[in-house]
Amino acid sequence: MRLSRPCLVAFGAVTFVAGSLAWPGTASAAGTNYVALGDSYSSGTGAGSYDPDSGSCNRSANAYPKLWAASHVTDSFTFVACSGATTTSVASGQLGALSSSTTLVSITVGGNDAGFGTVMQTCVLQSDSACLSAVNSAKNYMTTTLPGKLDSVYGQIRSKAPSARVVVLGYPRLYKIVSVCVGLSNTKRNALNGAADTLDTTIDSASGRAGFTFSDVRDEFAGHELCSGEDWLNSVTIPISSSYHPTAKGHQLGYLPAFSGSSRLALQKEG
């Protein structure tokens, strides 16, 4: 886990607002009111064991927010991350989960804004040139339009939960580049990895402007990307929405450690 900013302020939540629950655990986070926001990489799409009440949001019992809350004694835990969330849907539908009493927030957001699903479909089904064109368009969006969208939602989160410590998690590279691996060409794989790097750089910068903590998960996932032989990510799978998302192991051994280290610093700072 690489931490690039000190913890400071607040974050937002999903179209479905779950009730607050206290989860017993092994570590003390007494006085912590934790809200887990964001998209499918936070809801746990691809990790299985979904809460039926979460519907298409696909909130998984194996997702890193649930795992963290289950291992800490907190005053409250509200899990509202939702598959398909964008900066716009976070701002319009998730911020109701935040309040002046919120003390800890996690979020992943930005990938859907940049057209993650469409880019992956193009790269899986079409030519190298079509894939490169889609990736370049997405990267242009990431560097020109996405920063403003992130600044906007981060600012709204700050105003909703002014005392919260916010951890913004990034996205892993999808592929380990090897000479033999069935599926996409290395041209496509390198392009997609480059898009992940651009996305993480954009999110890191916006997190810094907001005074939030950015936790980079690329180091946790290094050696466990697709084509590594020890994948923590789903390739093309059924249901198709789970494709190119972290597995249960990816949440347990990738995202959870990345968030735990950051949240520990936040709690220490708050104490």
Image (tube, grey):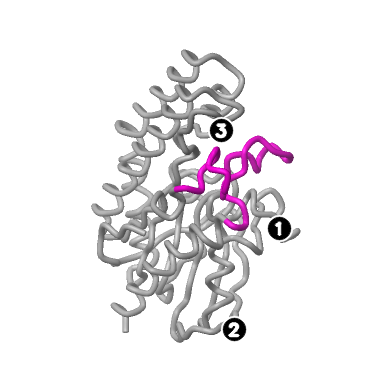
Q: Dot 2, crowdedness within 10 Å: few (<14), some or many (≥20)?
A: some
Q: Residue at x 65, y 59 (%)?
A: 60
Tag 2's secondary structure?
loop
In the image, what residue type sits under mark 3? Gly
Q: Quadrant of residue 173?
A: top left
Residue 80 % position (x, y): 57, 60
Q: Is residue 183 magenta?
A: no
Foreground of the two, 254 or 205: 254
Residue under circle 1?
50
Does residue 271 sit above or below 219 in this rendering? below
In the image, what residue type sits under mark 2? Pro
Classify residue 229 as left or right of residue 193.
right
Q: Residue at x 59, y 74 (%)?
A: 20
- First reached walking from the N terminus: tag 1 or tag 3: 1
Q: Main secondary structure of the magenta part?
A: loop
The boundaries of the magenta stretch are: 223-249
- First reached walking from the N terminus: tag 2 or tag 3: 2
Foreground of the two, 141 or 102: 141
Q: Residue at x 69, y 57 (%)?
A: 54
Does residue 54 sit above or below 199 in this rendering? below
Disc ID at residue 24: 2
Does residue 131 sit above or below 44 in this rendering? above
Residue 98 % position (x, y): 46, 66
Q: Dot 3, crowdedness within 10 Å: few (<14), some or many (≥20)?
A: some
Foreground of the two, 253 or 140: 253
Tell me how far mark 2 sits from mark 1, CA to CA. 20 Å
Disc ID at residue 205: none
- First reached walking from the N terminus: tag 2 or tag 1: 2
Tell me how far mark 2 sits from mark 3, CA to CA. 36 Å
Q: Is residue 235 magenta?
A: yes
Residue under circle 3?
117
Classify residue 26 as left or right of residue 192.
right
